Image: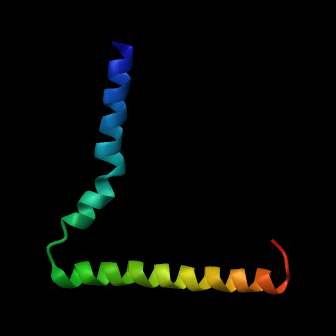
Amino acid sequence: MIANNFFRALAEFFTEVLFAPYRAIGSIDNWWASNFFNAILFSITCFLFIYWLGQLRKFRKANSE
């Protein structure tokens, strides 16, 4: 019985607490706000990818692993 309550509590924690930001993002009804949010995430991802490639190039030039 204790294990059953533990797994129910764990499931409730994931669905109610950790997935709350995803529900908030999914509930945006304004088209401009949704696209602005996606553009911000895309920009951050592009910046981090370019930074990562720069670090790879720096380590390749230094011949280190």
Quarter of the picture holding the N terminus? top left
Residue at x 30%, y 37% (from the top left corner):
12
x, y (%) of residue 53?
63, 83
Q: Which quadrant of the view contains residue 55?
A: bottom right
Residue at x 32%, y 36% (from the top left corner):
11
Q: Nearer the viewer, residue 65 or 38?
A: 65
x, y (%) of residue 8?
31, 28
Q: Nearer the viewer, residue 31 or 46?
A: 46
Q: How many marks?
A: 0
Determine whether, in the image, residue 24 is placed left or right of residue 42: left
x, y (%) of residue 6?
38, 24
Residue at x 32%, y 78% (from the top left corner):
37
Residue farthest to the top?
Answer: 1
Residue farthest to the left?
Answer: 29
Please say if 42 is above or below 6.
Answer: below
Quarter of the picture holding the C terminus? bottom right
Please say if 4 is above or below 30.
Answer: above
**Tell me, what colour scheme is on the image?**
rainbow
Determine whether, in the image, residue 7 is placed left or right of residue 57: left
Residue at x 17%, y 82% (from the top left corner):
31
Q: Nearer the viewer, residue 41 or 49?
A: 49
x, y (%) of residue 21?
32, 59
